[in-house]
Amino acid sequence: MASGFEPIADTFADNFRWRGDTAASCVVYAQGVPVVDIWAGRTARGTWTPDTRTVVFSVSKGVTTVCLLMAAERGLIELDAPVAKYWPEFAENGKETTTVRHLLAHQAGLVAPEADVTVENLRASESVADALARQAPAWPPGTAYAYHALTFGWLVGEVLRRTTGLRPGQWLREHVAAPLNLTMTYGAAPASADFHPLADPLPSTDPDAAALMAAALVSPMVERSMSLGGVFDIANLIQTANGEVWLSAEIAAGNLVTTARSLARLYAATVGEVDGVRLLDPYTVSDARVLRSEGRPFVGPDEGNRWGTGFMISSAHRPMAGPGSFGHDGFGGGLGFAHPESEIAFAYQTAQPGGLPDDRANALCRALRACL
């Protein structure tokens, strides 16, 4: 560990003492090189190592956003152009003016599919995208927002496929993971020795947590945004995420499987060079950090998040390294982000979701800010 970053190690150790992590990793890059690389614990499969992979849920959205922004930099996609320019079928039912940026900013009004999704649909992801293309939006696109928990991946992923000929997993493999030597895929073989199933969540420390969760899911649209009509059991999300159905599909909004080392390295390459590789130029990053969505959503609770173009940006709920930060967190406690002004990139990966409230990643970020 580089000198000056010891508070992160101390906080990491405290997480194990006060939250009881079964296993976790934290990696920080500064100016393109790792300055923090710590891990500890065990899972049901054995000793946790820095090469252990897990599902990181919505952390996936940040990575998928990087892939699409790379294609935009190549002149293949205009973010403020109508989606129908690249995906003509999408213009049905009042969506002809929906832009690519609306998809990325959770403003498209396609939070949940109206038609039930089957396992076969999941494994042929274009069929989910086709169903969304036929669907009417829940609000005039661009006039409101709500979190597109899983549909984000099929919407953004189909634009990427239509413009590049590559699905998100292919773009990730060829243009991101291979150049940077990352261990990162959408989905995984559950029997892989380096894949560790997630453990059951830690007990909540908030006596009102169950009521808050029930309130969040009281809307049929919010419930359907995760269950997709019953193909996933969101009451047992950890078991779902460890199962073959979740892991055998390409769910670009939710089933990224990776390590903290790879996640931090990816974000480091969005704000500087990492071994000669840079993924995004400064203008792209600056534009992606402009606030696009915040406040009370069309449906679901206001958790205090703020959204740029595809990325979460710094907020009171998720401050990251402070103003200017961009990235994405995920159910279970994972977090990856970068901060261009300091050329810092951060990743936290854990095998056990924390109970509500889960302050582990935020505690590490407070320690990180103290180091800067």
Image (spheres, rainbow, N blue to C red):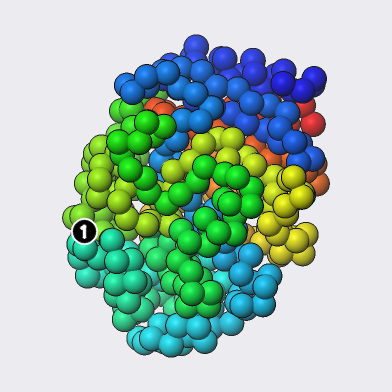
Q: Residue at x 64, y 48 (%)?
A: 180
Between 176 and 286, the one nearer to me in the picture = 176
Q: Is residue 90 above or below residue 45?
A: below
Residue picked out by circle 1? 119
Q: Is residue 315 above or below residue 102?
A: above
**Where, by quadrant of the figure, is residue 133 drawn?**
bottom left
Residue 345: percent from left, percent from top:
68, 40
Q: Residue at x 43, y 61 (%)?
A: 153
Residue 91: percent from left, percent from top:
41, 87
Q: Is residue 15 above or below residue 247?
A: above
Relative side of 153 to 203, left or right: right
Q: Is residue 224 visible?
A: yes
Residue 285: percent from left, percent from top:
71, 59
Q: In terms of secondary structure, where does tag 1 sit?
A: helix
Label 1 neighbour load within 10 Å: few <14, some 14-19, many 20+: some
**Which residue is farthest top?**
17
Residue 84: percent from left, percent from top:
47, 85
Relative side of 258 to 274, left or right: left
Q: Residue at x 53, y 74 (%)?
A: 164
Between 112 and 297, the one nearer to me in the picture = 112
Q: Looking at the picture, which amino acid does disc 1 mark?
A: Val
| Image quarter (top left, top right, bottom left or bottom right) of the C terminus | top right
| Image quarter (top left, top right, bottom left or bottom right) of the N terminus | top right
